[in-house]
Amino acid sequence: MPSLHDQATPGSERSLLRTRRGFLTLLLLCGIQFMDAVDTSIVNVALPSIKHSLHVSQQSLQWVISGYLLTYGGFLLLGGRAADLLGRRRVLIFGLILFAFSSLAGGLANSQGLLISARIVQGIGAAIMAPAGLSILTTTFREGKDRNTALGVWGGVSAIGAAMGVSLGGLLSEGPGWRWVFFVNLPVVALALGGAFWLLPGERRRARFANFDSQGALLVTSGMLLLIFALVRAPNVGWSSTQTILELAGAAGLLVVFAVNELRSVNPLFPFSILRVKGLAAADATQLIAFAGFLSMFFFVTLYMQEVLHLSPIQAGVAYLPVTVCGAISAGIASQLVARIGTRPVIVAGALIAAAGIFWLSRVPVHGTYAADVLPGLLIMPLGAGAVFVAVATAANAGVSADKAGLAAGLLNAAGTLGSALGIAIFSAIATSRTRDLLAAHVALPEAATSGYRRALLVASIFMLAAALIASRATNTRGQPAPGSTPEPAAPPLLDAN
């Protein structure tokens, strides 16, 4: 079956985005990414309601968030490469179905065990569908103006979704109830499944399961799961504890063995040749560092608004609406700038602006107000962050051949997830240490907690500055066509399709 690009451009350079089918395809893929981004944060504000309703212990409550993060980060590389080898539409549909069933199970859960299990499976579903969706986008739209625009919208949706998740979580948990933070996914998945069957062309399976690098898949998934598990647990058990050191060492060992396995494999899950694509490694490193500062900001600002300013969950959720508006504006502008001046100046400028916004938030006082002390930072930060994530997505996918598009998408998403886990782990330890020191010095709890949040946000702003520094040394990708990066080829490039 011909690709969308072939259908839209028979013998011409006609823009696919100017066609109805192309526009609807972009809408479908961005809708899937929006749902994926929303679910990284939608549960946060609902946690107090979940704790009261299901009598969840404080220790178990963190796994409602961490369980999703663990499997999402752990399965991303496997999900991305499976899309390349087994068919992107097929893998996307499987991920959507898994996500829907786990969302239904989470909404119906009557115990903490079932809820946490549902979140773990939901993370796997998201890890399968996210890179498949992005790789479909990059192989559908021609590199250049079409793909820059499509990636601009996609990157903006990613940044906006994380902010909207907090707002939606507050509205739903205080409205119809916390269970709707899961049920809301079901109609979206139903629409996405219908759109996938209608809009996306079918594919032949590229690899026999007998030729699939199952050993590499097991090693990289185990290594990523153990690495993120160690990062999530480190703030509670201590960075210097024997358990944390052994877990990090075990994760490093598994990933080293994975690398050796891939170098020797005839059909590797992770062809290291992808790292030779100009700008890809720097873009993924920028994504990791920037996400560490960006998503950690939501965590600490939410705590400040609820614990210090005493905003209700719904008020804390609505407080992030300016982030979605500014993020959308920034993404739209950035997608146009990337085509004119390239990715490097957009990322550097965006990261500096985002760092300034987070630095503003690091000055929040104990007796502050939302309008004077929080809102200005929430207006500045997304103007920069939206530009960063649009340009990074463009740089991380430019010049990648169609047969490795899923892997590139998985790498980008994995970098963001690993950065989020790393940021929360490091900054939580910084905030907790500062708060404990002040409490030991008999400082009142509100002052001690606020000082801890300020210290964590200050370091988050420094991480954003580091992202700007990394980007300043990266290749300036302008989204021009590169050899081997044409839309999906008709013939399978890697393995026997039978």
Image (cartoon, grey):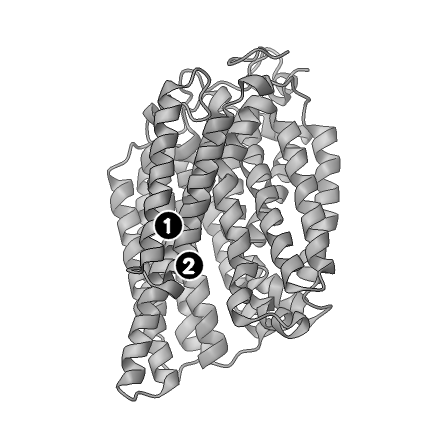
For badge 2, the amino acid type reads: Arg
- The x and y percentages for residue 256 are 33, 34
Q: Residue at x 55, y 50 (%)?
A: 37
Q: Residue at x 75, y 43 (%)?
A: 190
Contact between marks 2 and 1 (CB within 8 A): the answer is yes
Above or below: residue 276 compared with residue 184 = above
For label 1, count other residues whose C-alpha is less than 10 Å away and answer few (under 14), some (14-19) or many (20+): many
Query: N-terminal of the two: label 2 or label 1?
Result: 2
Residue 233, numbered circle: 2
Left or right side of 224 for 184 = right
Left or right side of 277 for 193 = right
Between 482 and 207, the one lying in front of the other is 207
Q: Residue at x 37, y 65 (%)?
A: 428
- The x and y percentages for residue 449 are 37, 78
For badge 1, the amino acid type reads: Glu
- The x and y percentages for residue 211 are 54, 17
Residue 472, numbered circle: none
To which quarter of the image does residue 353 belong?
bottom left
Residue 247, numbered circle: 1
- The x and y percentages for residue 486 are 49, 18
Marks 2 and 1: which is nearer the front?
A: 1
Quadrant of the rendering where the N terminus is positioned: top right
Above or below: residue 95 compared with residue 492 = below
**Helix, strand or loop at disc 2?**
helix
